Each structure stands twice: as C-alpha cells, then as structure tokens.
C-alpha cells in the first residue's frame, strides 16, 4: 500500500498556475525528496499535502483516504518547518505535548511518548528549556521531536536544514538519515539543495515551473536525467552542455563540435542507438567528473574520447580541483584529482568518458 | 628633533579637539537644560500651587518658590468645591471617568486583539479591504460623528450616561486597537499557526495558547494608549453628557471657565492634578510602552 | 493562507468543517459592522444632514448646498478657518523644529537619556484640557509669566498673549508646540536611530563635520519621517478643539475660534445642526486633503521599493 498518492494535482493562485498536474506516489517507508529551484511549487505541494493550502483540482490520498477536504489536524501527518515554528512561550516539553493535548491523548501515553522521543533524539536535558535558549541544531532536533511524538502516517519536512550553517547542516543530514532508517516512516522532504536530495532520498522528484520533471531513484536522476533542466540542476558544478552535431566516424555514431583553435572535435558515441540521423543537432551533456587528463593507460579502455583544450581558470578546493576550459565559444568545467590537475594556460589533453555522456534534443530538451 | 615637533603638533591637535568636544558638550547639556526647564516648570507650578495658600499666590504670582505649605486645597478640590452648581468637588467626575475609561479600555483592547488575530492570521478573501475600511476610523474627526452619536444614544436610551460614553469609546477605539494588534501579530510567523493547526489546535486554542502568550508587549501598549486617550477625551464627554454625568475633563473646563471671578488657584491646581494624575502615573510607570504606542500609532 | 478559498475544495466538507472555517468571520462580524456604521453610515448621515434643512432636530428635506454657502459667508467661520490656517503653519513648523532639535541633542550619546526623554514627552500623557487650563494661568498677566518677569525687574515686560485679540492665537500655537514637540522628538529620534551607522561612519571618515553629516547624510535618509510627522501634526491641528476651549475659550471675543469649536457651537448651542454638519464636513474634507495624498504617496513609495527590491 502506498502512503501517499497524488493524482493530477493542480493549484492556481488567481490566474497564476502554480502546480500544473502533479502525479506522485510514495510507498510505505519511502523517503521522497521534492527538489527544485525556488518558485518551482515544491513548498506549495507540501502545504497542500499538509492541508494548509486548498486543492484547485486533482486528488491527494494519504493511506487509503482521500484527504482533499480533510483538515490538517485530521490528516495523520506531522511536519517540520523551515523556521522550526517552535512555540516560543512554551518549554520544549510543552512544545511536544501541545499536539497530544490538542488531540486528547491520555496523560500516561503523553509522558511515555515524550520519554521515547527525547531519548531517541537525545534532548532529555533540554526538555525544560524554552526555544529561545536553544542553539540552531537543538531547535532543529526539538522540531523533529515535536513531529515524532505523534507517530503519524506521514512525515513532512519543509527545507528543515536551510537555516543551519554549513557544517551543522551536514551533521543534521546524517542524523535525519539515521532517524529515518530507525523510524521507517514515509517521509516527504522539500529542499532546494540537490545534495540533500541525493543523500537522503530513496526517490527524488525534481520540480520545475509547477511540474515534476523527473521522479526516480537518485542514481537514475543523476546518471540519466530526463531533460536538460534536471541534468543542469542536479550536480555541482553543473553538467556541461555542448551544442554538437551527430555524425559517423568509421561507420560508428559520433558527435562533432567546434573547439577553440578553429579545429573540430569528434567524439565517438559509446552506446550507439539506431535512429540517430547524421547531421542532426544535439546537446551533448558531460559531467565535470567525466573529464580527466588523458594518459596512455586510458586509451585502452572503451568509451574514451580525447581532445585538447586550453585551461583558463584553475580552482583548487583541496580534495579536488576544478578547471575551466574553453571549447570553442563555450566554457567547460572539469573536476580533477589534485595530482592530475591542469595549470592555468595549459593546453590540456582531455579524456572524455563517453559512457556517461548524455544527449539531449535541443528542441524538446529531452534526453535522447 | 623632528619627532619632538611632531609630538607637539599631535598634542596641540588633541588639545584643540578636546576643547572643542568640551564646549560642544556644554552646548548640548545647556540646551537640554533650558528646554527641560520650559517643559517641567508648568508641572512644578501646578504641584507647588496646590500646596501654597491663596494670599501668597496672589502676592508672589503663580511662578514662585513656595513660602507656605498647606493641604487644604486637596480635600476641597476632591470633596466640596462647587463646579457648575453642584458642590461635590471633583470626586464624582473622577469616578465617572474611571467608570468610563476602565470598561472601555478593557472591551476595546480585547476586541482589538481578536480582530487583529483574525486579520493577520485568518485572512479571507476581502479581509485586507475590510481592514482598510476599519482603519478609516482612525482618521475620522469627532465632529463628523457627534450628531449621529447624539441621536443614536438618545434612541437607545444611553444619552447622558456613562454607558453611552463607554459605547462611543469602544467603537471609536476599535480602529486603533485592531490596527495596533494586527500590525503586531503580522510579525508572528505564520509557520507557528500552521504548526499548531497540524498539531490539532483550532481557532480559539491557537489564540489562547500561542498568540495570547506572545501578546504582553502589544497588550500593554494598547491598554496604555486606550486608557490615556479615553481618560483625556473631552469633546464627547461635554457634548453627550451633562452635569453630574460628565467626565473629569469636562468638569475641569467648567471649573476653570466657571462663573466666579475670584481665581482660587490653589484649589484649581489640586483639581487639575487630580484630573491629570491617572494618565501621568500610567506614563511614568509605563513610559516605554507609551512611547511605543505613539510611534506605532503615527507611522504605519 | 486562504481560509475561505478552502471552501472551494473538491469533495463535500461536513457542516462542522464549514462552521469551523466560518468562525473567524463570525467573530469579526460585530466589530466590522460597528466600524462600518461608525465610519460610513455616520459620515454619510452627517453629510446628508448638511444638505438638509435641519435646524434644531434632523429633518430630511433636501436643500442642496445652501448651508455651505451660509457657512462660507459667515464672518465667524472666516475667523475660524483663518485661525486654523495660522495655527497649522506655525504649530507644525514649530513642533517639528523643536522636536528635531531635541532629537538631535538626545542623539549625541548623552548621559541619562531616558531622564531627558521622560521630561520632553510627559506633556503628551496629559490632556489638552489640563495643558490648556494650566497655560491659561501662565499667560495670565496678573499671575503668570508677565507678572514674574515684571517682578524680576523688567517692569515694562509684556506677555499678555491671551488678552490680545491679535496675539491670542499665538498663545495657542506656543502651547500646542509645548505639548506636541515631544511627540515629534520621539518620532525623529526613532528615525535617527534607524539610520545605518555604517553610513554615518563613512561620512566621518570622509571628513564631514557633525553638522554636515546631519544635513547631508542623516536627515535626507529620514526624509519620509519628516513627512509622516508633518501629516500627523496637521491632523492634530485640524482637529484642534480641547486646547483652544481650555486655553482661551475662543476669546477674547471670538478671536480664537476654530472650525471644530464652530461645529460644536452651531450644533449644540444654537441648534443649527445643518450648518454645523456642513462645517463638520469641511473638517472632514480638510483631513482628506491631507491624508489622501499622503496615503497615495505611501502606497506609491512601497510599490517603488518592492519593485526595486
């Protein structure tokens, strides 16, 4: 049974169409990430699942119940807010009790739930403090605690980590992953951070302009992005897009595109397909990590194409080094191990791992 | 040698700067002192004169260092002085004002809080327009509503009654209290309300448990604003009520412009202080909130 | 958060849900109705009365602008609005000038700041009636300021403002400034404190004197506050009633009468409610003439700011 099913969901604010027919479903225990740039409709979608926004048309099912017109409190959900939304005048304990009191949960059960969750999140020592006396990370924990005491069918997270500093964010990310593993509740997690989505989710829904662009497992979304938007949004530095033309080399399909010095690069395609007409314009997508310094060892491996490009900027980050290279009119980013990193101004011999290259149709923007 | 010269110049410059600073401080405190004298003297004059005896006042004038001390003026002003024919002093009008101000303050503040809560956290289609319409009440000149109030209160039998004035001040105060509370509640994050809704709380539970505990600052501001405003109000008090039903502001005017040609400055000073005391006490104990109300009321 | 919008949901919500959604509107309704009556019905009724031939009691026979013509032909009304004009100009400029000076003085990192502020602001807590009564004594030539100064030796000193037909209006102006400059100070001070201190530091590093820093850097950034203070003070001025009643009671003669006093006299002393209502409508129009452009300006500025942001 799936915990959440969304069918052709639409939302208009006046004349503005915010969601244009969303279809989504979460199996029991799944961790679904809704990811996309700001304004893509992901938070509206979450608010509609929570019952905080009305439904213009379509259906939302939680468990086996159609909840379109069910009040938030009756939807059997719990939510963690971006701002945490802890009640500032109540202690941590009172914050966690509030929902159970509203629902008339018996007292012993309330105490038992608090004890269980406080132990789980290691916030026993904070129970009598007010939110104002907590650090950002502690508030985050309490916010999750407030959701957890309820034992709901569905957990909703609305960008819960975006108010934390970078280091804490990584720690809490791990924490959430552990927690989900232990509690096993179906979770819908909204974020604009593709790394969070990749690390946490069992499936990712990439949203853009009120539509789900792709809904699949993280590896698929990353390796076989459905379209140019998804390809560009997932991954940092972003995938390089190169306008190219289909051709054949020695009877095998390949792509060609102009290089900086007036020459033309011709790269053989690895997973050659049937109907690729020669001369057709395509967009070649190559992730930065699939560029490397060419050496004779690589030559033997299959699916490697080579070319040479001038290096314009080199940006070491410690663990790896990014370099900006010029392919004709385009700037292309590569990600190198520090040992084989290029120098500025170098004409670098590059090996392109064509097994991971993606081709997109420039007209439809879709993956070919 | 060069160093010594340099040092001297530095010393000289520092001295000049120091002297300039000194004189600018003198100027600042001097001006402040002069102005505060102008502000504070009228208060001192009234306080002193309420304890001086009348012959001394007529001899030395109102603005003088007191050379006599007696308390007689106070009981006279409170209890027996004749105002507009009735010789009962200020006490009756003082209690009229109290009876009017306290309920009107409580009711208008309570309604303002609820209205502000709805207009900020339970908005509905058109609620912004309705709020703007309510806001117009803030700017209505009293003269426009004088006649309608007089006739309406006459119709419902509340003319010349303290209850009538309570009604007037509650309804006129609604615009202010709603505005104050709404602008304060707008800054409470909507997420709190959403979280509470998901937690199963409804309209009233969210108000009592979440919003009200966050309200003391605006509650104090609103109560002080309403209390001083209603206590100090004159126009409606003098138009809608007469004689023994008037509030203290109307009695003060009757007293100081009344028939007698002899100016009993000692008793009148005491009477003025009785009329000014409640808002002054509120101001001296809640000044911070009073100022906050002023600035909020003015700049929206 | 749209609550009513939720009613358009797919599926039929139960009556309990519907009632729950209606609670805010039901609770708000009495206040809304009362305010609506107070603002629109009352104003509309007074406007209608001003166009009727009512005298002692309201009647509903329409006579057009007759009473407005009578009003503007009346010498007393002319005195009243001339007074209002004089008072507004001097009172607003005076209270703003004193208020700004006090605000700048207090902004100089002085000691015991709250002590000074308390002194300058306390007149606001006191009613116009109390202020007017006390100042009428201070202006009294045989007991007040004139008496004091003459006793100090300047035996020709004259400060009998309230007994001079030409000068009495300025007694009200001075008292009004005394009462309200603290208010202007509070608003200006709030503005000065909101100025980004980095800008001030930058000006100092650029070598600007304190005076220049205020004139060129700080005051221009709080220009909107000047306008707000001016509008609020103008609004006070137009509504002036209590102060003039308590201070001079329109006297000497009718030399310090004000529109608001005129309304009161016509309606409740002379039983000419239609003409009184016409005068009240004029006050409303004066207020609108100040507030409507200001409101439009504020809206325009917000639009511009949000457009740029």
Image (spheres, coloured by chain):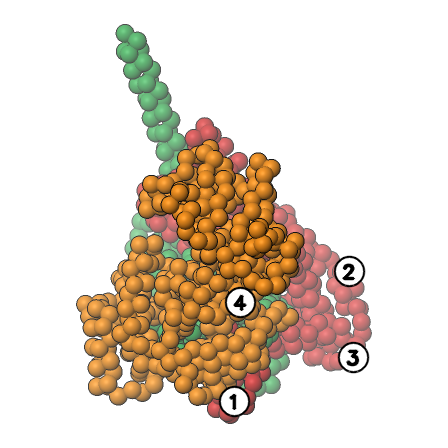
> What is the chain letter for disc 2?
C
Residue at which label 1 appears? C13
Measured Cα–Cα span from mark 1 to mark 2: 65 Å
Label 2, label 3: how many angstroms apart (C-alpha)?
A: 22 Å
Q: Position of residue A99 (x, y in %)?
A: 33, 80
Q: Which chain is green?
A: B
**Which mark is drawn over residue C73?**
2
Tell me where residue B104 appears, x and y as whole percent: 45, 75
Q: Which chain is orange?
A: A
Q: Secondary structure at mark 3?
A: loop
Residue under disc 1 on the same chain as residue under disc 2: yes
* Residue B216 sits in quarter: bottom left
Are labels 3 and 4 assigned to the same chain?
Answer: no
Label 2 vs label 4, nearer the camera? 4
Chain C: drawing colour: red
Element carrying mark 4: strand
Chain at numbered mark 3: C
Report x, y in % for residue B185. 44, 68
Disc 1 sits on a residue from what chain? C
Q: Chain of mark 4?
A: A
As drawn, the label of residue A213 is 4
Q: CA distance from mark 2 to mark 4?
A: 76 Å
For residue C61, the mark is 3
- Observer-side mark, 1 or 2, equals 1
Residue A72 visible in this rendered orientation of the protein? no
Q: Which mark lies nearer to you, 2 or 3? A: 3
């Amino acid at each position: 049974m799936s915990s959440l099913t969304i069918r052709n969901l639409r939302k208009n604010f006046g004349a503005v169409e915010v969601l244009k027919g969303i279809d989504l479903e979460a199996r029991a225990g799944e961790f679904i990430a809704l990811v996309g740039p700001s304004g893509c409709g992901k938070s509206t979608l979450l608010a509609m699942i929570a019952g905080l926004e009305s439904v213009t048309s379509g259906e939302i099912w939680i468990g086996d119940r159609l909840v379109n017109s069910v009040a938030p409190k009756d939807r059997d959900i719990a939510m963690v807010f971006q701002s945490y939304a802890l009640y500032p005048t109540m202690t941590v304990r009172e914050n966690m009790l509030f929902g159970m009191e509203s629902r008339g949960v018996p007292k012993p059960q309330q105490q038992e739930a608090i004890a269980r969750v406080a132990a789980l999140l290691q916030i026993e020592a904070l129970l009598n403090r007010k939110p104002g006396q907590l650090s950002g990370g502690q508030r985050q924990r309490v916010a999750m605690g407030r959701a957890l005491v309820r034992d709901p069918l569905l957990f909703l997270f609305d960008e819960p980590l975006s108010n934390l500093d970078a280091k804490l964010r990584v720690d809490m990310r791990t924490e959430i992953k552990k927690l989900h593993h232990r509690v096993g509740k179906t979770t819908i997690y909204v974020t604009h951070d593709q790394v969070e989505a990749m690390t946490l989710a069992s499936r990712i829904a990439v949203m853009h302009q009120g539509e789900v662009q792709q809904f699949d497992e993280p590896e698929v979304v990353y390796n076989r992005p459905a379209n140019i938007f998804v390809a560009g949004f997932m991954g940092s530095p972003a995938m390089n897009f190169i306008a190219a033309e289909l051709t054949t080399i020695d009877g095998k399909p390949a792509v060609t595109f102009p290089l900086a010095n007036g020459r033309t690069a011709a790269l053989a395609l690895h997973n050659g397909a049937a109907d690729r007409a020669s001369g057709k314009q395509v967009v070649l997508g190559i992730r930065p990590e699939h560029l490397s310094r060419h050496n004779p060892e690589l030559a033997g491996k299959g699916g490697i194409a080579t070319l040479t490009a001038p290096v314009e900027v080199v940006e070491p980050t410690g663990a790896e080094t990014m370099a900006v290279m010029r392919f004709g009119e385009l700037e292309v980013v590569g990600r190198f191990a520090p040992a084989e990193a290029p120098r500025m101004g170098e004409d670098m011999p590059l090996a392109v791992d064509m097994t991971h290259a993606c081709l997109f149709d420039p007209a439809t923007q879709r993956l070919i | 040698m060069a160093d010594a010269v340099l040092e001297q110049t530095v010393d000289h410059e520092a001295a000049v700067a120091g002297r300039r600073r000194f004189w600018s401080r003198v100027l600042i405190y001097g001006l402040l002192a002069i102005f505060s004298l102008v502000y504070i003297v009228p208060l001192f004059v009234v306080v002193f004169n309420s304890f001086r005896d009348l012959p001394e006042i007529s001899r030395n004038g109102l603005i003088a260092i007191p050379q006599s001390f007696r308390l007689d003026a106070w009981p006279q002003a409170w209890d027996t002085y004749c105002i507009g024919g009735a010789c009962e002093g200020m006490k009756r009008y003082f209690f009229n004002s109290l009876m009017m101000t306290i309920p009107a303050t409580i009711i208008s503040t309570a309604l303002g809080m609820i209205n502000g809560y709805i207009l900020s956290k339970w908005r509905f289609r058109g609620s912004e327009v309705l709020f703007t319409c309510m806001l117009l009440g803030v700017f209505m000149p009293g003269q426009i509503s004088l006649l309608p109030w007089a006739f309406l209160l006459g119709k419902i039998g509340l003319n010349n009654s303290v209850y009538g004035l309570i009604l007037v001040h509650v309804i006129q105060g609604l615009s202010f209290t709603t505005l104050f509370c709404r602008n304060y509640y707008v800054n409470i994050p909507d997420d709190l309300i959403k979280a509470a809704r998901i937690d199963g709380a409804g309209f009233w539970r969210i108000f009592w448990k979440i919003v009200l505990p966050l309200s003391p600052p605006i509650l104090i501001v609103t109560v002080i604003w309403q209390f001083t405003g209603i206590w100090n109000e004159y126009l409606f008090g003098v138009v809608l009520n007469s004689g023994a039903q008037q509030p203290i502001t109307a009695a003060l005017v009757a007293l100081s412009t009344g028939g007698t040609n002899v100016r009993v400055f000692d008793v009148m000073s005491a009477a003025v202080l009785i009329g000014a005391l409640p808002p002054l006490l509120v101001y001296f104990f809640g000044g911070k909130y009073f100022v906050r109300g002023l600035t909020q009321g003015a700049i929206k | 958060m749209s609550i009513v919008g939720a009613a358009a949901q797919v599926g039929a919500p139960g009556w309990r849900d519907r009632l729950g959604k209606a609670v805010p509107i039901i609770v708000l309704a009495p206040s809304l109705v009362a305010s609506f009556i107070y603002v629109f019905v009352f104003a509309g009724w007074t406007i209608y009365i001003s166009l009727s031939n009512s005298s002692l009691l309201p009647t509903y026979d329409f006579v057009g602008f007759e009473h407005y013509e009578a009003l503007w032909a009346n010498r007393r009304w002319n005195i009243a609005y001339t007074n209002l004009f004089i008072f507004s100009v001097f009172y607003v400029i005076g209270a703003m000038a004193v208020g700004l000076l006090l605000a700048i003085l207090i902004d100089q990192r002085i000691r015991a700041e709250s002590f000074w502020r308390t002194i300058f602001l306390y007149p606001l807590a006191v009613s116009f009636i109390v202020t007017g009564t006390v100042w009428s004594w201070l202006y009294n030539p045989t007991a007040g300021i004139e008496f004091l100064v003459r006793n100090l030796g300047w035996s020709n000193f004259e400060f009998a403002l309230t007994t001079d037909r030409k000068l009495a209006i300025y007694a009200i102006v001075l008292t009004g400034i005394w009462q309200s400059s603290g208010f202007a100070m509070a608003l200006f001070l709030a503005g000065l404190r909101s100025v980004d201190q980095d800008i001030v530091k930058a000006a100092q590093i650029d070598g600007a004197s304190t005076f220049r820093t205020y004139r060129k850097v700080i005051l221009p950034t709080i220009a909107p506050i000047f306008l707000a203070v001016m509008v609020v003070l103008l609004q006070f001025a137009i509504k002036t009633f209590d102060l003039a009643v308590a201070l001079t009671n329109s006297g000497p003669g009718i030399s310090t009468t004000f529109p608001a006093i005129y309304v009161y006299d016509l309606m409740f002393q002379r039983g000419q409610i239609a003409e009184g209502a016409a005068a009240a409508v004029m006050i409303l129009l004066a207020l609108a003439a100040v507030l409507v452009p200001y409101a439009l300006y504020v809206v325009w500025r917000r639009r511009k700011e949000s457009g740029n942001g």
